Image (cartoon, helix red, strand yellow):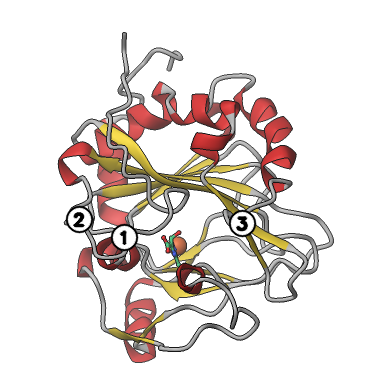
Amino acid sequence: MTAIDVAPLSAEMLADYHRNGFLLLPADYLPVGVLDRLRAAAPGVLAQDGPQRVLERDGVTVRSVYGPHRSDPVVAEVSRSASLAGAAGQLLGDEVYVHQSKINLKAAFAGDQWEWHQDYINWRDRDGIPSPDLVNVTVFLDEVNDFNGPLTFIPGSHRHGLLDGSYTDDMPAGYEDAPGWMATLTATEKFQLDRAVIRRLARESGLFSATGPAGSVLMFHPNLLHASSPNMSPFDRAVLLLVYNGVRNAPRPVDAPRPSFLADRDVTPIPLGS
Ligand code: 6CS
Ligand code: FE
């Protein structure tokens, strides 16, 4: 592909995504230089002090920093590129904008888990997004391997829609004094899925861990069941996540909107192909 190809995904790739709920592309998918620029930008994003930075339950290790598609010029530019925004547009069949972005660090030794969950329930219940027509586009900023907590999926699980579970009332341990929106961003999942359902789906379809070198690009559906284990390795493992939404699926008004670094309400489409 070339950098100006606004439809970078083949028909086969689109079919794989819709069947499995994810698509893992090799590191040469991104134009030359993009990974280096993102890796150079990441430390500045992770050093941002403010509410958009979420710590692990140890209270010192950075877990995630939200909103770099607004706060960082390199992430902003890459998020508007044809390779990523154009692919999201193909997957969603719509013009797109970024609903949420983050760098998840998963620090050496201390980077914690994400329990089994589906993303869309948060974007529906908290942000008023009417349908699961969003896509997570992930760029590996470091190698992701068996030892550093790869994203693990149940392939095809997105086709079941939102699954049964229940919200836990309390703030997670270690975050008792944090603002309420923090509850969906920690290692203790706020919406606990029914474990029997997870087991049944995993028996049927197995598990898949998305591993690959830095620069790999992973796209996945917001109803795909996923989790990841702690980083057991002695090396940091960062990923950039860009959540694209279709403009026809813009958020409806909600009673208590989340901060804009978690849910961007500017739905101006990203211009492509000009
Ligand atoms: O609250 C949110 O928006 C999110 N929470 C989870 C557990 N996954 C995706 C999303 O970043
Ligand atoms: Fe998630």
Question: 120 or 264, which is in the foreground?
Answer: 264
Instruction: Assign the C terminus to one quadrant of the image.
Output: top left
Q: Mark 2 against mark 1, which lies toward the viewer? A: 2
Which mark sits nearer the N-terminus, 3 or 1? Answer: 3
How far apart, in angstroms, are the residues tagged by discs 3 and 2?
26 Å
Q: Quadrant of residue 248?
A: top left
Labels 3, 2: front one: 2
The spot of residue 225 in percent (x, y) is 38, 69
Task: Tell me, yes or no, whether the two marked residues, 3 and 2, touch with CB atoms within 8 Å.
Answer: no
What residue does disc 2 label?
A: 253
Residue at disc 3, secondary structure:
strand
Mark 3 vs mark 2: which is more N-terminal? 3
Residue found at the far top of this picture: 274
The response on whether ligand 1 sits within 8 Å of label 1 is yes
Q: Is residue 153 visible?
A: yes
What residue is shown at x 41% (from left), y 88% (from top)?
Answer: 169
Inter-mark Cα distance, 2 to 1: 12 Å
Q: Depth check: 77 or 12 in front? A: 77
Quick one: SS at disc 1?
A: helix
Dot 2 or dot 1: first in sequence order is 1
Residue identified by numbered label 1: 123
Q: Are marks 3 and 1 in contact (CB under 8 Å)?
A: no
